Amino acid sequence: MGNNIILEMKNIDKRFGGVHALDHVNFTLKRGEVHALVGENGAGKSTLMKLLIGLYKPDSGEIFFDGEKIDFKSVKDAQDIGISMIFQEFNQVKVMSVMENIFLGREPKTRSGAVDFKKMYHESKALLGELGLDLDPKTRILDLTVAKHQLVEIVKAISLNAKIIIMDEPTSALSQNEIEYLLTMVRALREQGKAIVYISHKMEEIFNICDSVTVLRDGKFIYTGKVSEVTEKDLIRMMVDREVSELFPKQKSQIGEVLLQVKNLSVAGKFENVSFDLRKGEILGVAGLMGAGRTELMETIVGARRPDKGEIYLHGEKIINRMPGDAIRRGIAMVSEDRKKNGVFLKLNVKDNILMSSLNKCLIGPSISRKMEIECFDEYREKLEIKCSSATQICQNLSGGNQQKVAVSRVLNSDPEIIILDEPTRGIDVKTKSEIHRLMSTLASTGKAVLMVSSELPEILGMSDRILVLHEGIMTGILSREEATADKIMELAVATNKEE
Amino acid sequence: MFDFKRFNVALHLKNFNSIQFINNNGMAIAFIIIVIFLSFASPNFLKTANIINILRQVSCIGIATLGVGILIIMNQIDLAIGSTFALTGIIAGLTVSTSAGGMGLHPILGYAAGIATALAIAYLSGLVVAKARIPAFIVTMGTMSIGRGLALIFAHGMPIGNFPEGFTYLGTKSLGPVPWTIVIFILMIAIVWYIMEKRPLGRYIYAIGSNEDAARAAGINVDQVKLKAYLIEGALVGLAGTVLAARIKSAAPTMGIGYELDAIAGAIIGGVSFNGGIGKVGGMVLGALLIGVINNGMDLLGVEAFYKQVVKGSIIIIAVLIDRKRSGRA
């Protein structure tokens, strides 16, 4: 029995700055099994796997492969030993052919040192055939569907003689037919004795093809066992069950008239027919799993994306935001999810960041008044307790929490009526987190409306007056604060009810 | 324990600042060292006449440096500066020239025509860069060729001369002891400083250079700001090209070859980050002066023209290396 174990990860610990990403996690994998790895967004699944393939190094803990202790220095080391990961975003050279991608970096050579395309072609063809794939190795990746991209990645993993194949949300971009095909292939791999780690949110698939399951929550190991011994409800409960004590208690606020109405809003491939109202003084939480279309919905409301269908009404009047600037002028401002990508200007100083969306406030005649700039800066430094050495400190040198406060300050400084916060506390420390929660509460009680996207259920449950849940772009429900529980939200987010 | 930690933080901050001081002022220090070296190496270097001469030579390229500096801060570029110099010179020249092909119009119309020409080229570049989102490097490589070609076409491949005195006045006469070209340069420095430091447009330019996605999300009309920045640059290059024609009293379609190199080098040496978002007007001016001093110094020391190219090229690479190191540290 013991020799059936191919991989053991023991007491794996990993921190990113102040965030404890993995807290002494254990993980065991057997030959010829499909092992589901589940947990909420940010539970540590991807981090654990990235440690396994040598992309990160654990702070402490040991990894045994076939009973031998291993210590990878790079992804190549992991590949050589037989561990391959199929990423969510594929690392493929799109303009090259299938066979070139399969043999990328280890092309067969002729005697003169040129690439032996003939050999490459025949070997690729054989590999594809092994998995019953009818695909010309000379086709460019570009011309294939997303599902086929994934299959090519799997073929590549097999050609690398992988003994362990890690699949991270492999079906998230696939249609029903393609999913069937992929699952058939996973079964075929299992027959060959490969061990497969299957990261997924989709309960159906887990119960359909997985043998074992491991649950992580907040970087902690929660459960491991046979899939046949648990129910869907058990899994959901283990994924979300958690204390809600650390959070800032929400203040009661007066909920007033409707400010924003969204009607049948759709963006093809992202979300469909989403409708809701947002009232003065209300915090509307938006829950859902990764890829549910939450961020895209917010971006459409502020005009960073164009809707294909549907209308938005502000104070009962129809509005069209062509770009975020339009939304800001109308009093709708958004703090984006990825502050490094589009939330803060890292090379600019704190003061310029805070003022960027509302420079006109500091104009005297045609010129920016330095005095008024400093007044604005002081106001927000005090209000949000931003820790910086001076107004001219460059944002790059601030901590993540303080950068987030700067991004929030910029948005608030544009005097919005409606504030959209996309993952407002992701990756920031507990103290800043509770400060941001307090701020949200204050904003709502002063009559602003807040739309908050969050993947953290305690945050959603603790802060929201109502909760809108999306599942793969479809609104599966709106829960009131009273009726909402973690289990209910999770059920709507994985849409177990809908499938039946 | 607590005190120890604080001490460490203080030490760290202190270190950081001294490194930053050298980084931020490295160019000024290099400038001073070069000036001291040249004043010993050549007795003529520090004479008033030579200094005025350097400033005069620097003025036109310096104005273009300000223009392209704005674009580089915005994480864009203009490679068409040299050919725009030629085309504006030719168009301005044809407008005022009293010889056969010229129109012999009023000098003010000459300046207007020159600047309008450069504005048109910059507008074309800016429009394609902003609206079609094609990299500025490619677009302005195109306008570079278009500009040079048009200059050759309009001038029939020949230099143009016979400018009226009213036209050459700004290029050749002085305001008291200070040549007009220098006065114009100083005026442009003031205007660009005002735009970059005091107008919202300047902040938006920095913001786009720092992070274009964030600029859009912050509500900045990115396309419009890009277009405006190109137009400002166009106006500056047009003015510089026309003044240059007025200074040398002729315009040739082959004028200004390699000027984009000098202008971009001046901005980069002056601390403008090639990755955008960082750079000050004062630095650009110092960078342009450094290029001028090095050119002049090599003349005085009798360095052959061919070697000057090699030296300038090397300086650009060194300046970018320093920039890379600086941004890597931050």
Image: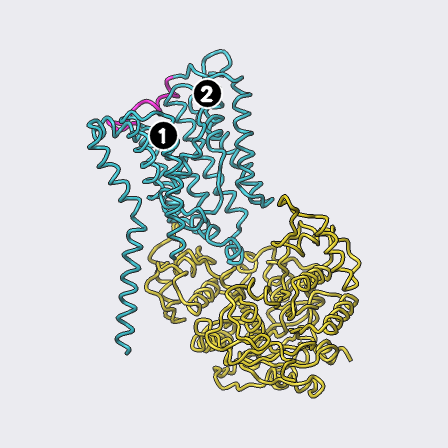
Chain colours: A yellow, B cyan
Disc 1 versus disc 2: nearer the observer: 1
In the rendered structure, the answer to whether residue B6 lies left or right of residue A319 reads: left
Residue shown at 31%/33% (left/top)? B294
The residue type indicated by label 2 comes to Ala
Residue closer to the observer: A441 or A191: A191
The correct choice, above or below, for A244 with respect to A342 in the image is below
The residue type indicated by label 1 comes to Lys
Residue shown at 72%/76% (left/top)? A205
Which region of the structure is painted magenta?
A: B165-179
Of the numbered discs 1 and 2, the one sitting upstream in the chain is 2
Residue B93 place in picture, x, y as percent: 46, 20
Q: Secondary structure at mark 1?
A: helix
The quarter in which the C terminus of chain B is drawn is bottom left
Asked if one can make out residue A470 in the rendered structure from this viewpoint, the answer is yes
Residue closer to the observer: A92 or B187: A92
Other residues around mark 2 within 10 Å, as few (<14) / some (14–19) / many (≥20): many
Q: Is residue A105 magenta?
A: no
Q: Dot 2 falls on which chain?
A: B
The quarter in which the N terminus of chain B is drawn is bottom left
Q: Is residue B175 magenta?
A: yes
The residue where tag 2 is placed is B252
Residue shown at 22%/28% (left/top)? B42
Residue closer to the observer: A349 or A464: A349
The residue where tag 1 is placed is B308
Residue B250 place in picture, x, y as percent: 42, 19
The correct choice, above or below, for B224 with respect to A279 in the image is above
Q: How many marks?
A: 2
